[in-house]
Image (cartoon, helix red, strand yellow):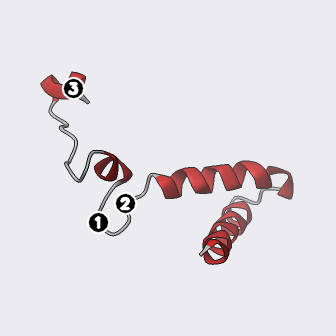
Amino acid sequence: MAKPKNQTIEKAVQAMLEVKHMPEFYWAEAVRTTVYLQHRTIANGVSPRELYTSGRNPNCNKKDRTQL
């Protein structure tokens, strides 16, 4: 499972650097950014926050934000 995930990260990093015409010097930062974004993206219809809170959606009402 690690190999396909690493390949996905590598392709995303290569695309990011190529689109922005950035030197390979920024490879590590691009990897960090890619992994950060992947961990915060909805997968299978469930966000990481929903997984953490046992499937409950976070309450985003302005008056109830202190409970988050």
Q: Classify 38 as above or below 63.
A: below
Q: Amino acid at mark 1?
A: Gly
- Disc number placed over residue 67 in the picture, else none: 3
**Badge 1 element:** loop
Q: Amino acid at mark 2?
A: Ile
- Disc number placed over residue 42 in the picture, else none: 2
Residues marked 1 and 2 touching at CB (< 8 Å):
yes
Give the quarter of the image for residue 64. Answer: top left
Residue 33 at x, y percent in the picture: 62, 50
| Number of numbered discs visible in the structure rendering | 3
Q: Classify 58 as above or below 3.
A: above
Residue at left 67%, top 76%?
3
Q: Amino acid at mark 3?
A: Gln
Residues marked 3 and 2 touching at CB (< 8 Å):
no
Q: CA distance from mark 1 to mark 2?
A: 6 Å
In this picture, residue 59 sits left or right of residue 48: left
Closer-to-camera residue (26/31): 31
Closer-to-camera residue (62/54): 54
Q: Which quarter of the figure is the C terminus placed in? A: top left
Residue 9 at x, y percent in the picture: 64, 66
- Looking at marks 1 and 3 on the same chain, the residue that comes earlier in the sequence is marked by 1
In this picture, residue 25 sits left or right of residue 51: right
Q: CA distance from mark 3 to mark 2?
A: 22 Å
**Badge 2 element:** loop
Numbered disc in front, either 3 or 2: 3
- Looking at marks 3 and 2 on the same chain, the residue that comes earlier in the sequence is marked by 2
- Disc number placed over residue 45 in the picture, else none: 1
Q: Which quarter of the figure is the N terminus placed in? A: bottom right
Neighbourhood count class around disc 3 (C-alpha, 10 Å): few under 14, some 14–19, many 20 upward: few
Residue at left 66%, top 62%?
16
